[in-house]
Image (tube, rainbow, N blue to C red):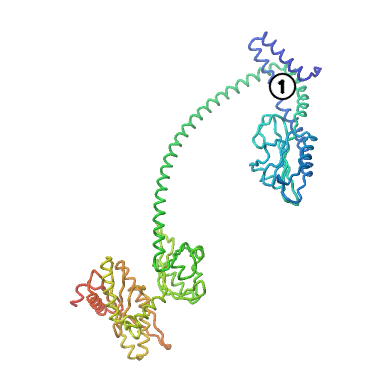
Amino acid sequence: MSPEPVRPGVEKLFFRDTLIVRLNILTGALVVSLSVVLILPVASFFFFVPAYHGMLTNITEEESLRVASHLAASITTNGSPIHRQSLRASDHQEISALVKHFKLSKLRLFSDTGEIVFSTESEEIGSRINQDYFYEVVARGKALSKTVRKDSPSLEGQVQSVDVVETYVPIMEQGRFMGAFEIYYMITERKEEYDWVISRYLYTVFVATLILLAAVLLTAYKAKQYLSRRYRAEQELRAAHAELESRVRQRTAELKESNESLRQENEMRRSFEAEVELAAEVIDSVIEGICVTDTSGTIERVNRRFTEITGYTAKEAVGDNPRILKSDRHDPEFYEKMWRSLIQTGRWQGEIWNRRKNGEVYREWLSISSIRNSDRQVSHYVGVFYEVRQLLEKQEQLSRKAYHDTLTKLANRELFFERLEEALVRAGRLGRKLAVFFVDLDDFKTINDSLGHQYGDVLLKGIAERLLFCCREEDTVARFGGDEFVMLLTNVTDRQDVVGVAKRIFSHLAVPIVYQEKEMAIKASVGIALFPEDDSDAAGLVNKADAAMYQTKKQGKNSYHFWRADDDAA
C-alpha cells in the first residue's frame, strides 16, 4: 500500500530529520549506503522531469505565439516600417495594457533595422540587437521561440532568474518586414505545480528504494568507480592544459619572429613602391606612346603620350583591349603575322593603321615586346609607338632643303653624313654603339635594262620603303645613288641586335614587288661596320661597310658580312 502523499515542504522536513537520525546512529558504511539509496530517486528525477517540462514547454510556446500574434495585430504600421517616431502614445498604452493582461514577464518591440523602439525595461530603448538570428530568421518573416530556464543563458546571452518562454514574432505587411515583437512569457507558477506532482512521485520511488538497499550498495560501488575514472580524467586534463600553455609560449615566440619578418617585408615593399613610382614618372615623360597589357590583351597601363595620341584617357583604356584602336584597314593575316613574330621572337615592329577616339585614322610605328617573369613565362606585352606623320613631316622639311633623294625621298649622301657625324658625337658622349649598313642590290641593272627605267624606279622606291620599314624612327636610310643604299642604326645594344635588323631586311626583300602585273624579285648584298669597334670616323665607317659589302658579293651575294681587318686588303 502506497504511503499518503505529502506536500513538498513536509517531504523536505521528513528527509532532513531522517538523515540527521541516520547520521547519529549508523556507521560510516551505512551512512554511505543510505546516501547511495538517494541516487535512485534522483535518477528517476532526471528521467521523468524532462518529460513533464517538455509538455509544459510545448503548451506554453503555443500560447506565447498566440499572444505575440495578438500583440503584432495591435500595431498600426500604415505601410511603413516601425520606428520610434511612428509609435503613438496610444500604441504605448495598448501594448502596456496587453502586457499586464497576459501577465508577460517582459516585452520588446524592434524596428525593421533591429533597433529597440519599445521595451518594458525603458533603458533598453534605442539600443540595437546584434544577433545574427534576428536578421537571418526573424527579418525574413519567421517566428522564433526558445524556453529559457532558470540560470540558463537566453538568446542574447543574459542570465534569467525565472522560467520564461522567449518568442520573436515578425510584423509583416504584404510580404515586407516592418518590425518584430519579442516577449517573455513567465511559466514559473505552472512549473512549480508540475514540480509538486513530480515530487509526490519521487517520494513513492524513494520508499521503494529502501527495499532495494543491496542494489543501492552496488550502485554506490559503481559510482565510486565512476569518480575514480573522473579523477584520472581530471589529472589528464591538467597535464593537457600544461602542455597547451607550453605550446602557447612557443607559438608566441614564433609570432614575434614572424612579425619581425613582416616588418622587413613592409620596408622592402615601400622601397619597391618608390621604385615603381619613379618608373611611372619616367614612362609618362617619354615622347612615345606606351601601352602595357597582360597575356590576354587586357590593358593594364598607358602613359600620358598614349592619351595625347589616341584621345583615350587612362581610365577609359585600362581594363579594355587594344582593339579599341583598330582601324579595320588590316586583314586578319596581318595580325596573324604579328602574333607569330611575338610568339617566335618575343617582339614585333612595323607600321600599322589605328583609329583615335574621335574616329580619325592615323599611321603609327609600333614596336611590341614580350615581358617574361622569373619563370621565363610571358607575363605582359609592352607596345611603344609614335605617329608616322611626325616622321614624314620631318622628312618633308629636310626634303625642301635638298637633303633627300628625288626618286625615293630618302636622305641623300649629304644628309646621311650630317646625321652620322651628329650620331657619332652623341654616341661617343653617351657611350653608345652605332651600326652602318651598306646595301647594294644584286643584279639590279639586269632588271632595269630588261623592263625599263620605269620599272627600275618603282623597284628602287619599293626597296626604299622596305628598308625604312626595317628601321626605327631615330635611324636613317639614305640612297647614295644607283642601287646603293646606306643605313645608320643608332643606339645599338649589341651585335645580335644588328643581326636582327639584317635578317629583317632580307625577309622584306624576299617578297616580290608587283608593278603592272609584273613581279620583280630582288636580292641584296649587305656590309656592316660598327662604332666604336671598327672606326670612329664617319667616312671610315662608310668605307668599311662598303668593303664588307664587296666581301659579301664575293661570297655569293644575298647575305650580310661584318667588316674585318683583312677586308680592306682583299
Q: Is residue 151 left or right of residue 300?
A: right
The structure residue drawn at horizontal position 70% and vertical position 33%, both measured from the top left corner, is: 148
Q: Is residue 463 left or right of residue 26?
A: left
Q: Position of residue 284 (x, y in %)?
A: 41, 64
Q: Position of residue 125 (x, y in %)?
A: 68, 39
Indicate whether 451 appears above or below 532.
below
Q: For the residue labelled by badge 1, is the local secondary structure a helix, a strand or a loop?
A: helix
Q: Is residue 562 left or right of residue 127?
A: left
Front position in the image: 90 or 449: 90
Question: Disc 1 marks which amino acid?
Answer: Pro
Tag 1 residue: 41
Q: Position of residue 549 (x, y in %)?
A: 26, 78
Indicate whether 480 appears above or below 380.
below
Front position in the image: 126 or 225: 126
Residue, far top = 25
The structure residue drawn at horizontal position 44% and vertical position 76%, both measured from the top left corner, is: 363
